Image (cartoon, grey):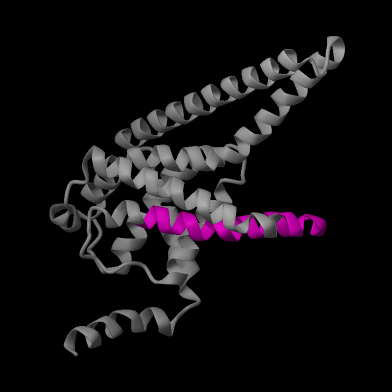
Amino acid sequence: MAARQGKRALDEPAAAAPSHRMTRALHALLLALRDLPHRRVLRVLVASLTWTMLLLGAAGTVLFAAVRWALERWQWLDGAALDMAGVLAALALVAAGWLLFRAVAIVVIGLFADTIVADIEARHYPGAAARAVEVGWRGNVALAAASLARLALGNLAALPFYVLLLVTGVGTLLLALAVNALLLGRDLEAMVIARHPGHPRLDRSARWSLGLLSAASFLVPVANLLAPILGAAMAVHMLHLRNGDPQT
């Protein structure tokens, strides 16, 4: 009974002021932006972007070569038509790379999750950092794999609705933003919770606010390069501010 009352007491402030969720998320975003210039954060940013671009480049090269080989092998096209098909395939791969950037970037940042979370906690929440458990590379791989699985399953489930909403012009984009906000909020929270398995999780609307700001940042050119790191830093601040951990 006491534990139930304690949990209710923890949730009551959040329930009493639902309009504050986005304000708290924006506050966390501002704190995350202040973390960007720090050396260790920049190292993780450079490393994660390098791996993301390498993976996207390698996947694009393999797919382009496979399409080109198939066209030549079965001689569906020849001459100028074959060259044009190659150009169109390259453009399609560039577009697909922009769409897949979010997936690859979040998977890659999951591999660096323990490093980035530990750095932000050590500077801002030393009490929480002292209580944290080390995730290790196996835990980071598990986080990345779980993120990829959620992304694939969530968007496959929504795929029929994406197709149906194409006629609206913006419906598919808005639904994709909503779906990926839910998925991203869960992914980013998991990166922090892995170090603090006993901490209360964010409530649904706070997780939604975290995911929505992160998903929206992936849609903005240039900002999308920073989005994975910003999202991870936001999750750290939101979780610890939510739990009342003292900030330095």
Residue 33 percent coordinates (x, y): 43, 47
Identify the residue shown where x is 82% and y is 57%: 167
Question: In terms of image quadrants, where is residue 172?
Answer: bottom right
Q: Nearer the viewer, residue 136 or 229?
A: 136
Residue 89 percent coordinates (x, y): 72, 25
Magenta stretch: residue 2 in it?
Answer: no
- In the picture, measured across the screen, residue 30 lies left or right of residue 195, that is right
Count of marks placed on residues: 0
Residue 218 percent coordinates (x, y): 56, 46
Identify the residue shown where x is 31% and y is 65%: 241
- In the picture, measured across the screen, residue 103 lies left or right of residue 64, that is left
Q: Nearer the viewer, residue 55 or 247?
A: 55
Identify the residue shown where x is 24% and y is 85%: 4
Identify the residue shown where x is 47% and y is 31%: 52
Q: Which residues are magenta?
A: 163-189
Question: In terms of image quadrants, where is residue 101?
Answer: top right
Q: Nearer the viewer, residue 237 or 214?
A: 214
Residue 175 percent coordinates (x, y): 65, 60
